[in-house]
Image: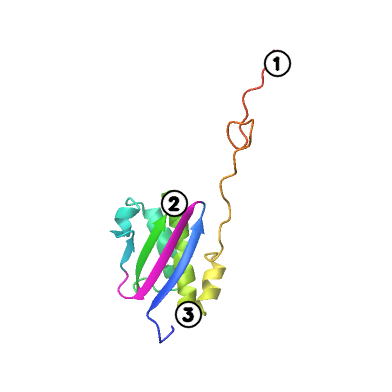
Amino acid sequence: MNSETTTFYGIGRRKESVAQALLTIGSGKVVINDKPAKEYLQDNESRLLRINKPLGTLNLTNSFDISIKTKGGGIAGQTDAICLAISRALVECDPNNRSGLKAEGLLTRDARIKERKKYGLKKARKASQFSKR
């Protein structure tokens, strides 16, 4: 870890969601938009596991207090954005963490976004039903 700083910052994006993570050395408390993580993520265990995966990969589960600001999109997109933000903050904390996180695929930005609507169609690809007569 860097000896001169005790806070580490990372930003993550997924679909329309953006998350900013601030890691401080502490006891493992996670706060998202001023709410406990369990409350913000609606007690969904899979989302909580997704957020804690970067810390679990490096065996740092109770080493950092995490403060997250997130906006845009839905809960699923925000969860993936938070995961990427925490991973990037852990790399800033110690560059040696990069190889372990990279092997798990936690540093890859998922670039898939919603396709734009085209004129003459109802949605991006949905057309009105064809009528022969």
Q: Residues within 10 Å of mark 3 (few under 14, many from 20)?
A: few
Q: Mark 3 points at which residue?
A: 94
Q: How far apart are marks 3 and 2 (CA)?
A: 29 Å
Q: What stretch is highlighted in magenta?
A: 16-28
Locate the C terminus by quadrant. top right
Identified at 35% across, 68% down, the residue is: 66
| SS at badge 3 | loop
Q: Mark 2 points at which residue?
A: 72
Give x and y (percent) for residue 6. Answer: 37, 80
Identified at 56% across, 63% down, the residue is: 108
Give whichever of 15, 37 is nearer the camera.
15
Q: Residue 132 carries which label?
A: 1
Total numbered badges shown on the rendered structure:
3
Label pair 2/1, CB-CB below 8 angstroms = no
Upstream in the sequence, badge 2 or badge 1?
A: 2
Whether residue 57 is visible to the viewer of this picture, yes or no, is no
Q: How far apart are marks 2 and 1 (CA)?
A: 43 Å
Between marks 3 and 2 in the image, the one whose residue lies nearer the viewer: 2
Identified at 30% across, 73% down, the residue is: 27
Q: From what the image shows, is residue 26 above or below residue 45? A: below
- Disc 2 marks which amino acid? Gly
- Disc 1 marks which amino acid? Lys
- Disc 3 marks which amino acid? Asp
